[in-house]
């Protein structure tokens, strides 16, 4: 609810000329997360889980931002490049 998960999409033109919206990046901002568990409950593919690892202390806040679907990951299967 606070924008800790950011989904970036782009429009791609298919070979038949139709346009399709494609999800290109899932970015997780751990520094903004309140650990409320709402994202886990609403995830349609059960891709997000909560566990007991909570030691996320870093000196550089930029290290708390993670791109979840790197090239070659399972999330990228079926995505037209």
Image: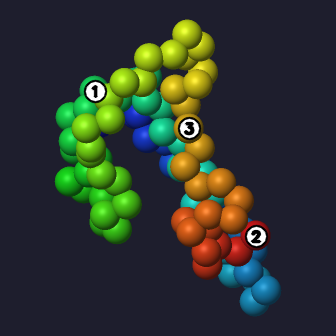
Front residue of 15 and 31: 31
| Nearer mark to the viewer, of 3 and 2 | 3
Dots 2, 1 in contact, CB < 8 A: no
Q: Earlier in the sequence, mark 3 or mark 2?
A: 3
Q: Earlier in the sequence, mark 2 or mark 1?
A: 1
Which labelled disc corresponds to residue 81?
Answer: 2
Disc 1 element = loop
Colouring used for the render: rainbow
Residue picked out by circle 3: 66
Q: Is residue 65 visible?
A: yes
Q: Is residue 50 left or right of residue 26?
A: left
Looking at the image, the residue that sits furthest to the bottom is 16
Residue for point 65% across, 54% down:
70
Q: Quadrant of the N terminus?
A: top left
Which labelled disc corresponds to residue 34?
Answer: 1
Residue for point 70% across, 74% down:
80
Q: Is residue 63 left or right of residue 44?
A: right
- Between the C-alphas of marks 3 and 2, the distance is 21 Å
């Amino acid at each position: 609810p606070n924008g800790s998960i950011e989904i970036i999409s782009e429009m791609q033109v298919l070979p038949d000329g139709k346009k399709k919206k494609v999800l290109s990046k899932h970015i997780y901002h751990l520094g903004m997360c309140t650990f409320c568990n709402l994202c886990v409950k609403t995830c349609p593919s059960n891709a997000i889980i909560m566990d007991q690892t909570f030691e996320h202390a870093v000196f550089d806040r930029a290290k708390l931002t993670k791109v979840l679907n790197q090239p070659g990951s399972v999330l990228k299967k079926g995505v037209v490049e």
